[in-house]
Amino acid sequence: MRVLTGVGSTPLSGVGTARWYRPEAGLTLADRPDSSTVDGDAELARFEAARATAREAIRRAGARAADRVGEDEAAVFEAHEEFLDDPMLVEDIETAVHDGTLAEHAVHDRFAEAIAQFEVMDGRMAERADDLRDVRDRLLRALLDTGTGAVELGTLPAGTVLLAERLTPSDTAELDPDAVVGIATVAGGRTSHAAIIARSLSIPAVVGVGSDLEALPDGADVLVDGEAGTVVVDPDEERRAAASRNASPAVSERVSTVDGRAIEVAANVGSEAELDAATDRGADGIGLFRTEFLFLDREAPPSEEEQYEAVKAALSTFPSDRVVVRTLDVGGDKDVPYLDLPQESNPFLGSRGIRLSLGEHADLFETQLRALLRAGAHEHGDNLAVMFPMISRIEEVTAASAAVDSVAADLEAAGTDYAIPELGAMIETPAAAFLADSLAERLDFLSVGTNDLTQYVMAADRENDAVAAHHDPLHPAVLRAIDRTTSAVQDADAWVGMCGEMAGDPALTPLLVGLGLDELSMSAVTVPAVKQAIRSTDSAAARELAAAVVTCETRDEVTGVLDLD
Ligand code: PEP
Ligand code: MG
């Protein structure tokens, strides 16, 4: 038995057979033959056959993704099919093939040009270039007949533990949670989009295992323990028996601490498809609807109507619970190619979230606010709350509130039904934590986004494996920033929640209750365990614990007080 350590991402365990996903493997091209020896017509036929095979694979992948994760995530495959039909690409390849180039070389050459064009046009167009690489590789796999050896993510056999260097969000969206019992990756962090999708699919996952994982062969017997953050090779019977993919049973009722303090336990979602998982696990509503997922992997922004329908679906799924919708939070690690976001050397410190909504993309913000205010007039619209991401200045709250009032005035003038929902701010920057009292005076609620708050307090990129140890929400500096926020709210007429990944760790529930959070919002899979943890927490003891923790000066002292290893 050998144990490799990474970062637990989905807190479930699964045992199965290792299978490597190496999208680049087997695609090495042979030397180019003399063009006079190549049969142009035969190559043309090979190219057309490869296109047909690739098209079929893309459509299958798109249908599976739509089924499992949602139409929005599946839109990336429509874009892939458009690349397959791009008249310029196809004509150039056909001409080269006709003139005596082997089909695989023609595909390789023409796609290389197109990829380079995207990269040169705008460095932030990397996602489009990735899409082109994806389509090129499908064509090459069909042409080189590596199809049988290549791993088709959507049809992996039952009991697969998928191993990969790194998965993209669209790779992850393709996986069948009934077949894939675990994921382990060499690189990547638990707050990356791919990890967030794996959690929403309830697939046990450990990320960032490092190069030791590369030594695992296909076919190895592997246990992925997403709670402990370990990958166990040849697990013994005891570990095997303890590994269960079943999360704790759902707790559908609302919960309180031992002494009766009610804490809301809500779910984070990024698409309509994830709403079902949230109800299944017994979430008390939605504490974070990441609307940017409605904007990713497509060619143009969603319309006002589409956004209105998505919010309405969330309100109808939780008719008696609060639904907190976050306005568009792009920039940083979330690029949306068609928005042409500025190229920046420090995108996490650049145009992100509310900065874009109040600047270059005020038009998108207005459309989104129209959809949200209209949804406020829906039969369950009273439950709607709207929050602004990446707030760092009071002026941003003033301007965002003015935008809400202006949209309300327009709707009023047009005779359209609307209602202004509760408004709140995310506390994701040190500036927002320092200004929490002033923010709480002006808003109905605050929600602590620990993924970003940790990266900005600790100056440690949440996506960079090399500084993963610094991206530590248990560092006293982060805990004091949270304490400052919750203390500020106590004197105001506002509530305070937490929607970063930290909220979903049941080992931290007593601390978070003690710090004074009224609501905790997390991936649906962890809702039951956190509800159970609240039920066995005593508020007074939790307050004492929190008071002791905020005086700590090091992480070790914090884990000592919390009795964690
Ligand atoms: C956060 O930063 O903690 C958060 C919830 O937002 P996101 O992970 O979407 O950046
Ligand atoms: Mg954030």
Image (tube, rainbow, N blue to C red):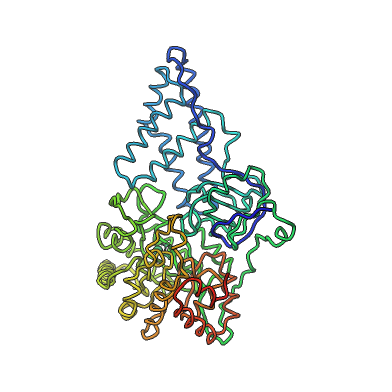
Between 558 and 91, the one lying in front of the other is 558
- Residue farthest to the top, as pictured: 36
Q: Is residue 442 above or below residue 503?
A: below
Quarter-of-image position of residue 151? top right
Query: Measuring 41% from the left and 19% from the top, which residue is drawn there?
Result: 98
User: Residue 357 is drawn in which quadrant?
Assistant: bottom left
Residue 368 figure quarter: bottom left
Picture coordinates of residue 314 (x, y %)? 47, 65
Q: Residue 550 versus residue 341: which sits nearer the camera?
A: 550
Q: Name above or below for residue 357 compared with residue 537.
A: above
In the picture, the quarter occupied by the C terminus is bottom right
Residue 397, x across and y down, in percent: 29, 71
In screen coordinates, is 533 left or right of 475?
right
**Residue nearer the viewer, 497 or 465:** 465
* Ligand 1 picture quarter: bottom left
Q: Which residue is drawn at 38% across and 34% down?
A: 86
Q: In this view, does 491 lie to the left or right of 540?
A: left
Give whichever of 75, 529 is nearer the camera. Answer: 529
Badge count: 0
Percent x, y of residue 374: 36, 67
Is 404 above or below relative to 16?
Answer: below
Looking at the image, the residue that sits furthest to the right is 237
Q: Is residue 440 above or below residue 179?
A: below
In percent of width and height, residue 215 lies at 60, 44
